[in-house]
Image (cartoon, helix red, strand yellow):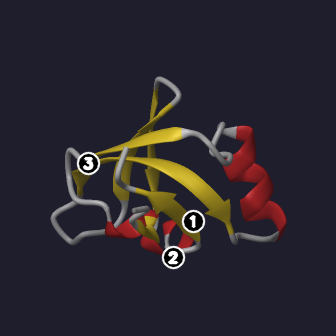
Amino acid sequence: MNNISSLSSLSEGSTAVVTEMNSTGDMRRRLMDMGLIEGTRVICLHRSPAGDPIAYLIRGAVIALRKEDTGKILVRTDC
C-alpha cells in the first residue's frame, strides 16, 4: 500500500520519493532546477526549532525549504 503525504509532513530521518509536484510558476521551476522532480528520493534531515524551514537531502545537496512550498509536494513514504 502506498503511503502518500506532503513533503512537509516528513519527520527527521525519514525518506520518501516524490510522486507529484503541485507547485506552480517560478517556485515549480526553481524546485525542478534543484532536482526535485517525480521519482526523486528525499531525506528529511533537520527541522528548525520553529519548524520552518526544513532541511532536506536532495540528490546529494542539502536544501532548506519552507513548509509553504513543501506542502504542495506529494511523496510516498513506504520506500
Q: Going 44% across and 42% down the picture, which residue do you hit?
A: 42
Residue 1 position within the rendered picture, expressed as x and y whole percent measured from the top left: 39, 62
Q: Is residue 49 above or below residue 34?
A: below
Left or right of 50, for residue 25: right
Query: Which residue of the protein is positioned furthest toward the front in this rendering?
Result: 1
Residue pointed to by mark 3: 14
The C terminus lies in quadrant = top left
Left or right of 47, for residue 29: right
Q: Going 73% across and 50% down the picture, which residue do you hit?
A: 30
Task: Using the rendered view, name the quadrant where residue 62 is placed.
Answer: top left
Mark 3 or mark 2: whose residue is earlier in sequence:
3
- What amino acid type is highlighted by mark number 2? Glu
Q: Which residue is more in the foreground, 48 or 35?
A: 35
Residue 58 position within the rendered picture, expressed as x and y whole percent measured from the top left: 49, 36
Task: Using the rendered view, name the quadrant where residue 36 is placed.
Answer: top right
Q: Is residue 58 above or below residue 2?
A: above
Residue pointed to by mark 1: 73
Determine whether the residue tagged by mark 3 lies in a helix, strand or loop.
loop
- What amino acid type is highlighted by mark number 3? Ser
> How many angstroms separate mark 3 from mark 1 (CA)?
15 Å
Query: Which residue of the protein is positioned furthest toward the right in this rendering?
Result: 25
Given this view, does label 3 or label 2 mark the residue nearer the observer? 3
Residue 40 position within the rendered picture, expressed as x and y whole percent measured from the top left: 57, 39
Mark 3 or mark 1: whose residue is earlier in sequence:
3
- What amino acid type is highlighted by mark number 1? Ile
Query: Which residue of the protein is positioned furthest toward the top in this rendering?
Result: 60
Q: Which residue is more in the foreground, 49 or 39?
A: 39
Q: Which mark is residue 36?
A: none
Q: Going 37% across and 55% down the picture, which residue do you hit?
A: 77
Residue 13 position within the rendered picture, expressed as x and y whole percent measured from the top left: 20, 44
Residue pointed to by mark 2: 68
